[in-house]
Amino acid sequence: SMQRKLNWMLDPSHDNKLLALVDVEGFVPKEITVTVEDGKVEVFAEHKEERTTSRGKEYNYRTIVREISLPPGVREDEVTYSL
């Protein structure tokens, strides 16, 4: 679903441009961190799941790390994102 995809939008001169689309299906918003620094956008998502089975406890970990370089001329404070 589109609600589970992370859209990076750039807004120079009110002309929105898509920089990247990162699929974060299976993650909830609190598990996703977005940082913009040093000319790059980083998306970090981490999901930890624990369940008890007849054999004991099982753990499931999923991690996504994406780093996207900003195009020349785009300032870090111009970057917006949404889920």
Image (cartoon, helix red, strand yellow):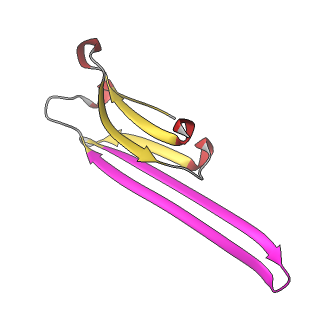
**What quarter of the picture does the N terminus occupy?**
top right
Toward the right, the furthest residue is 54
The outermost residue toward the front is 1
Q: Would residue 3 be counted in the magenta stretch?
A: no
Q: Position of residue 59 (x, y in %)?
A: 68, 73
Question: Is residue 46 toward the left or the right of residue 44 in the image?
Answer: right
Residue closer to the observer: 17 or 76: 17
| Residue under the image location 59 percent in, 49 percent down | 31
Q: Main secondary structure of the magenta part?
A: strand
Q: Is 39 drawn above or below residue 11 in the view shown? A: below
Q: Position of residue 17 (x, y in %)?
A: 28, 26
Instruction: Decide whether residue 49 is among the magenta residues.
Output: yes
Q: Residue at x 37, y 53 (%)?
A: 66
Using the rendered view, name the quadrant where residue 57 is placed: bottom right
Percent across and percent down for residue 20 are 33, 40
Which region of the structure is painted magenta? Answer: 41-68
Extreme-bottom residue of the structure = 55
Q: Residue at x 72, y 77 (%)?
A: 58
Q: Residue furthest top?
A: 14
